Image (cartoon, rainbow, N blue to C red):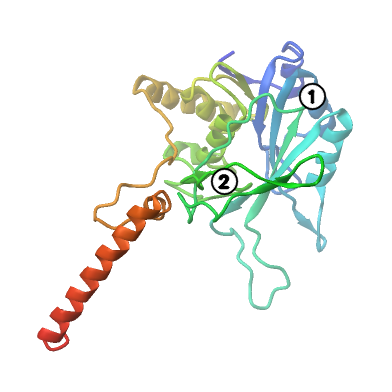
């Protein structure tokens, strides 16, 4: 493991032990949107190999979109999803990769809105064995609880008081629509990697690596392209394997892994927001107020009332100015 391989991915995958891959994270060459150096894409053969090599509880993250041909979207992405399902995989989640802009913005005289997303199908072999949901969505009502206590009914139908409600946490799991900025300095800071025509952002690959795998797990990208998935797997302590039939792209991916090696040496660590920044003033937060005892809350309100009376006196004395 831990190598970039130049070769036909169906043939190379066949060399792996069945059930040995914890996660495939990839974006295949789809429809006519990508010129994959003239190589063919035998989807069903590759998908079947991926299914065989996937571990029980493992996942496949399949980032894909559809071309518009003769006035209609091809629907290839949905046919591929159904084929994976027919192989025996669950369609665990249909996620969305939203871009910050479109390569072909809609015109006022057009008949179709700007295309700014791709699908991120998450297929699983049974229940996912790993799901480290990223909790970086801030909650507006952090620290607050609903008023009163919940109630439940006993076996006789009588209402009984439930346990106290827990306060809303500062952060919750993000939604399944992930928005990323794309382009230079956003997709990656490795300028040479843009020799590949269709990279997805490093953050996209990394967030899936962190969600669906643990350190030491094996992450494989059978269409490794510029090496984004393998780079993100490596710097986060996962074993990795990248395969590509294009010698040109393999050279880019190998250079990318040299960058990853330096990042590992520099002790790279991905950190997600888990707490809000500390307040620089004396204002009470929702959480502070919600956690107050009733007596403390009354005392605080009386204190504020006195401060308000003093402010009004000052305003009156200063001719309406504080």
Q: Nearer the viewer, residue 191 or 137?
A: 137
Q: How many marks?
A: 2
Which label was assigned to residue 131?
none
Badge nearest the viewer, 2 or 1: 2
**Can see residue 243?**
no
Position of the C terminus by quadrant: bottom left
Q: Nearer the viewer, residue 8 or 143?
A: 143
Residue 160 in percent (x, y) is at 69, 45
Taking the spot 57% from the left edge, 22% from the top edge, the residue there is 214
Q: Position of residue 64 (x, y in %)?
A: 70, 44
Look at the numbered discs 2 and 1 and tell me whether their residues touch, using CB distance below 8 Å: no
Q: Residues within 10 Å of mark 1 (few under 14, many from 20)?
A: many
Give me the residue at 59% from left, 34% from top: 208
Most extreme residue toward the bottom, as rendered?
319
The image quadrant that residue 73 belongs to is bottom right
Q: Tell me the SS state at disc 1.
A: helix
Quarter of the figure with residue 113: bottom right
Q: Which residue is mark 1?
A: 51
* Disc 2 target residue: 174
Where does residue 81 sit, x and y in percent of width and height?
A: 81, 40
Q: Position of residue 200 (x, y in %)?
A: 57, 42
Q: Between marks 2 and 1, how big is the CA–CA gap?
A: 28 Å
Residue at disc 2, secondary structure: loop
The N terminus lies in quadrant: top right
157 on left or right of 253: right
Residue 149 sits above or below residue 54 on the image: below
Q: Residue at image x 89%, y 33%?
A: 86
Mark 1 or mark 2, which is nearer the start of the sequence?
1
């Amino acid at each position: 493991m831990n190598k970039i391989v130049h070769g036909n991915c169906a043939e190379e995958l066949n060399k792996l032990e069945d059930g040995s891959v914890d996660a495939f994270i990839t974006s295949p060459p789809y429809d006519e949107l990508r010129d994959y150096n003239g190589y063919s894409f035998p989807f069903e053969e590759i998908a079947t190999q991926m299914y065989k090599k996937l571990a029980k509880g493992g996942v496949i993250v399949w980032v894909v979109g559809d071309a518009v041909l003769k006035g209609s979207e091809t629907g290839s992405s949905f046919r591929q999803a159904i084929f994976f399902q027919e192989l025996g995989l669950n369609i665990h989640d249909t996620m969305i990769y939203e871009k910050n802009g479109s390569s072909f913005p809609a015109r006022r005289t057009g008949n179709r809105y700007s295309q700014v997303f791709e699908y991120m199908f998450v297929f699983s072999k049974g229940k996912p064995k790993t799901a480290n949901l990223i909790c970086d969505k801030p909650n507006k009502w952090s620290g607050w609880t609903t008023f009163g206590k919940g109630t439940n009914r006993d076996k006789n139908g009588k209402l009984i008081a439930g346990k106290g409600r827990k306060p809303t946490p500062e952060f919750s799991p993000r939604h399944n629509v992930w928005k990323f900025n794309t382009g230079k300095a956003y997709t990656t800071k490795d300028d040479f990697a843009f020799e590949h025509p269709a990279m997805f952002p490093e953050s996209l690959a990394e967030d899936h690596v962190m969600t669906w795998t643990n350190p030491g797990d094996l992450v494989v990208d059978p269409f490794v392209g510029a090496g984004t998935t393998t780079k993100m797997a490596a710097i986060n302590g996962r074993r990795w394997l990248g395969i590509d039939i294009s010698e040109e792209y393999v050279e880019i991916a190998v250079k990318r892994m040299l960058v990853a090696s330096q990042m590992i040496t520099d002790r790279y660590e991905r950190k997600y927001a888990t707490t809000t920044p500390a307040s620089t003033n004396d204002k009470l937060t929702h959480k502070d107020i919600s956690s107050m005892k009733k007596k403390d809350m009354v005392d605080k309100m009386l204190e504020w009332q006195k401060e308000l009376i003093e402010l009004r006196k000052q305003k009156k004395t200063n001719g309406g100015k504080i």
